[in-house]
Image (tube, rainbow, N blue to C red):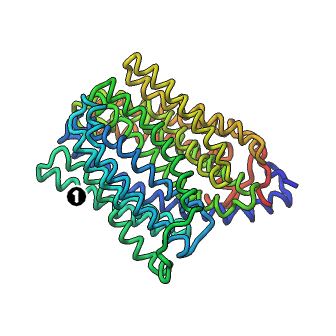
Amino acid sequence: MSTPTGPGPGAGAGTREKQAAPRARALAGGFGWETGALIAAMVLQLGYGAWTGRHLSALHFGAYATATAVVHVSASLTSGLTQYVLTSRERGPAFLAPSLLLAAGTGAASCLFFEAVAPLWGLVFSGVPYLVDFVRILVLQNLIAPVAAVCTAALRGELRFRTAALLELGGQAVGWTCALSALIAGWIPYGVALSPVLSGVVPCVGGLVLLRGMLRGARWERPGRELWLSLRSCAAFTLVQSLTYNLQVWSAALVLGASGTGHFSRAVYFVSMVSQTLTQALVRTSTPLFTRLAETPERLAGALRDALTVASGLLGVCLGVVAGVGPVGLLLLLGPGWEEAAALVVWFVPGLALQVLCTVGYQADRVRGDVAGVAVVQRVVLVGMLAGVGVAAALADARLLALALLLATGAGHAWQLRRWRRLPGWQGMLGEYAVHTALGAVVAGAARLGSVAQGGGPGLVPLVYGLLAGGAATACAWPVRRWIPALRLASAHGLLGRKTAAPPAVPRQSTAP
């Protein structure tokens, strides 16, 4: 029988803390390495983005963004295998070797197919120059990326988060270095496409070397029927995801033109650097944990809620800062001429925040085996995106096009919460979101005021003052940490030092089996 773990001492609370502490430490340790590597990658990406923003035009970026959206569809056909490897309870050479063969085969097939049909995309987006050549270069990543992704997913399945994160960081550094070298050598604008193509080399080669012990003695035979069925299921999921979220870029290319799409893509790219960092860190660390708890549904439900609590708290602070100083930061990063992109930054923040929460929920539901439920949520998100994009396209408004993501992910996550309401310990989730949203609004307001106080225009001084003000607002949460769900959870698990008791609040039920 479940035991409340709210205010007041008791044996049930002590039992839950003892059982939840290893789970929390595993999540925190993996999250720390994943986040550290992703932050390092984001710093390198900022430098790379600053150079390219000053040497490539909005027209170039619009063509690149449209081509990336096209190729992302082909990549989704093979990335489903990565999800299967990450969430599967099977391990060993008999499982890994066929997965690698399937990754290599499907990647090569999708590369050849999209190379052949590349001219058709030029006809669809006839107003976007450079598109066909960009597609033909970008699709080469399918020769390497699927195998690299399976290798890092296998490493994460063994809880080797640090190794996987460092391999991917090294790959990204190599990709950006090669792309930058090509651009400096004069291969403009196509040099920028080398980054995603070559970023998989290090994790592919390094992963195969590190997994050679597991692969020793493996029988490299044809993948079995179960693996094909799993790939089909996962590929269907990732394909729908890709089509849904790429609708925005495709609509921008058709309605706003290549230059308008360039500004649109740079704005979402800037905000996504933060949201994707959080998404990847959360998904990569929580999914193996969800998989290990899959046999005990109550503990899995508790782990999912913990992950969403942490995610919403981090999103409130991080994206609050982006909303406050993002426009100033983007202009400082890309230089003059990107004012249109800077004005769009804040419009992407709420939708991308909900997208992170949706993604974490997707992973948990797939581990739970609720494939039908995931498909329903995907349809809800797709319908919301179609409705939002349709209105924005009719009015030719880039701000409404950005808000289409909020409508889609908001509807999808609301449906997820509706389905989860019967799980143990899910009372009060909306209250936690409300607290973190309020915290994010305070941080955004403080950061904006700090920036405006120094002129609010592009420049290092307004950005620094905005960051300091946002940091000060975040620090003010520490004295009342017992009332902030994410900090309260971390403190209860001993991640902030001495464990503290929870304040009077909606109690969670035990997730111990």
Q: Residue 189: percent from the left, percent from the top? A: 19, 44
Position of 252 compared to 159: left or right? left
Which image quadrant: the C terminus? bottom right
Name the image quarter holding residue 358.
top right
Q: Which residue is mark 1?
A: 178
Task: Examine the rendered structure and indicate whether residue 200 appears above or below residue 488.
Answer: below
Which image quadrant: the N terminus? bottom right
Residue that extends furthest to the right in the rendered view of this protein: 1
Residue at x 46% of width, y 19% of height: 391
Task: Examine the rendered structure and indicate whether residue 205 appears above or below residue 242.
Answer: below
Could you say which is closer to the camera, residue 67 or residue 362? 67
Q: Amino acid at mark 1?
A: Cys
Can I make out residue 455 in this image?
no
Task: Examine the rendered structure and indicate whether residue 164 appears above or below residue 42.
Answer: below
Can I make out residue 222 in this image?
yes
Q: Residue 83: percent from the left, percent from the top? A: 53, 56
Position of 89 compared to 267: left or right? right
Residue at x 41% of width, y 73% of height: 208
Position of 10 compared to 417: left or right? right
Badge 1: residue crowd in 10 Å (few <14, some 14–19, many ≥20): some
Residue at x 66% of width, y 44% of height: 372
Q: Residue 30: percent from the left, percent from the top? A: 54, 63
Could you say which is closer to the camera, residue 497 or residue 395? 395
Residue that extends furthest to the left in the rendered view of this protein: 186
Position of 52 compared to 87: left or right? left
Could you say which is closer to the camera, residue 455 or residue 121? 121
Could you say which is closer to the camera, residue 513 or residue 37? 513
